[in-house]
Image (cartoon, helix red, strand yellow):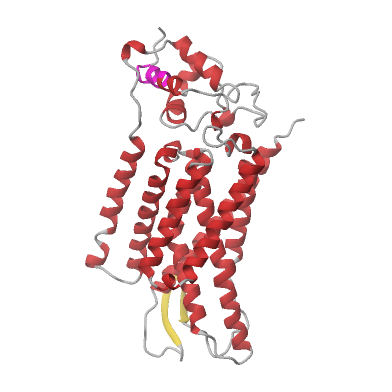
Amino acid sequence: MEIAVQDWASMLVRWVHIITGIAWIGSSFYFIWLDLSLRQRDGMPEGAYGEVWSVHGGGFYHAQKYLVAPKQMPNELHWFKYESYFTWLSGFFLLAIMYYWGAESFLVDTDKMALQPWQAVAGSLGFLAGGWIVYDLICKSPLGRNTAVLATLVFILVVASSYGLTQVFSDRAAMLHVGAMIGTMMTGNVFFIIIPNQKIVVDDLKNGRAPDPVLGMQAKQRSTHNNYLTLPVLLMMISNHYPMLTGAEKGWMIVALILLIGGIVRHYFNTAHTGASGKALIWQWPVAGLLVIALVLLVSIRSGEDVAAEDVVSAPQALAIIQTRCSACHAAKPIDPDFDAAPGGLKFDDIESVRKNSTRILAQSVLSKAMPLANKTGMTPEERQQLGGWIRAGMPDE
């Protein structure tokens, strides 16, 4: 009996990551909706900022918010923090299993920087920690008091980091690390700011002290950041399934557009939750749509010329390229030590299997350089061009 330990570990941890991520995002979206849906009404308790009525599951719910805290703490208080913690922990373990365990294949790209696996892992950890530290310092600086300036600086931080990551790691790893860095910032907000501030408020109330309203304002600011970053980070974390998003030459521009699109879409929902209408809600979707078109055009523009029709290679020549550059992994018995079985079950043992999967080959090895992983087999630009020309020409035999 042979057990694919890495594959099983990846699957189980990914499952946990998805479950906890759904729980975290769900509670985050709910509380943002709740906060923005609050309304002032007569008869509310002293100190209450607003309330909202909702219906779900056959029953009615009545929620009230206190900007600082009620005069007396309830006997039972529900905290929302473990969803964030376990999303980050499971995500980090998944990063370690996929990108640290197989760093020489998934993390390192010797065409960019000839790193040893341990150096690449250290660099990864440095980006994750450094991103949080710089972000936190910006928020705590005088610049962090201005919402527009703060948003601009965080945008620049993420885009600049994405540029740096594409100069160091493989294309797939770079985009995923941008998402991981943002996810670390988001969980850092919960762990270092939101929950500690709330604990101080609770402790003040229990001991008869008046809570500082600044603590709540700080927590609210970080919670709002998390809300606006959620949609971009979701796409970045699944970007390895879509190689057109991971082009190193344009990686920072792709990240910039994803941040803008996700932020604008989120702004639409946040604005709608406040009860706004008219001009406040008519610009987000058209602008987001135009930015999506810009993103599609950006990733579709490729450098270099297509192979001329008379230079199209034959089927045997195309198969030779595939078997030389791709069959180390995509074979019945891969010789690449990082794989016990062909990734995705794709085996390029004959020309028919190549033709059957030509769309994937075109996307992964021609339109992007996602494959071969880390280009360990040394596929040349000319070979990518020849392979693409053969596929576009209808994959002729001769």
Outermost residue toward the front in this view: 114
User: In this rendering, is residue 164 above or below 130?
Assistant: above
Residue 390 lies in the magenta-colored region = yes
- Prevailing secondary structure of the magenta residues: helix
User: In this rendering, is residue 376 above or below 274?
Assistant: above
Residue 383 percent coordinates (x, y): 45, 19
Outermost residue toward the right in this view: 1
Outermost residue toward the left in this view: 279
Number of labels in the image equals 0
Q: Is residue 19 left or right of residue 258?
A: right
Q: Tell me the residue at 75%/31% (across/down).
A: 2
Residue 337 percent coordinates (x, y): 67, 29
Q: Tell me the residue at 63%/38% (across/down).
A: 103
In terms of image quadrants, where is residue 191?
Answer: bottom right
In terms of image quadrants, where is residue 397?
Answer: top left
Q: Which residues are magenta?
A: 386-394
For the N terminus, the quadrant is: top right
Q: Tell me the residue at 50%/60% (across/down).
A: 25
Residue 23 percent coordinates (x, y): 55, 60
Residue 59 percent coordinates (x, y): 47, 72
